[in-house]
Amino acid sequence: MTLSELPLHRAAIVKAVVENQPGDGIARRLRELGFVPGEEVSLVARGPIGGEPVLIQVGYTRFALRLSEAARVQVEVAA
């Protein structure tokens, strides 16, 4: 499952950030922001137009991401 597919208010664990091409700057930036394997994340809110952007919480920090960016983060729903 990807972060863009995660239901609202569900916790998940980051499995990987997918690179669309070698040296992908967006994937690198997502990892720098804390989207690293083993980190807990949750989908806090969706935007009003087409569900974009999505508000993601990592630790105590919240980020607004485009759906295309959130789709690069593979997650597993926390038990």
Image (spheres, rainbow, N blue to C red):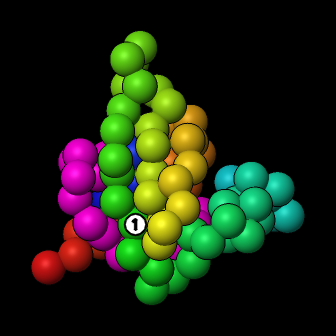
Position of residue 5 measured from the top left corner of the image (x, y, whole percent): 31, 46
In the depicted structure, whether residue 54 falls above or below residue 32: above
Q: Residue furthest top?
A: 49
The residue under the point 34% across, 39% down is: 45
Residue that numbered label 1 is attached to: 41
The quadrant holding residue 54 is top left
In the image, 26 versus 10, the foreground residue is: 10
The residue under the point 14% across, 79% down is: 79
Position of residue 38 measured from the top left corner of the image (x, y, whole percent): 45, 85
Mark 1, other Cα within 10 Å: few <14 / some 14–19 / many ≥20: many
| Residue 59 relative to residue 66: left or right | left
The quadrant holding residue 28 is bottom right
Q: Residue furthest left?
A: 79
In the depicted structure, whether residue 46 falls above or below residue 28: above
| Residue 12 relative to residue 64: left or right | left
Q: Where does the magenta region start and end? A: 5-19
Q: Amino acid at mark 1?
A: Val
The residue under the point 82% across, 63% down is: 22
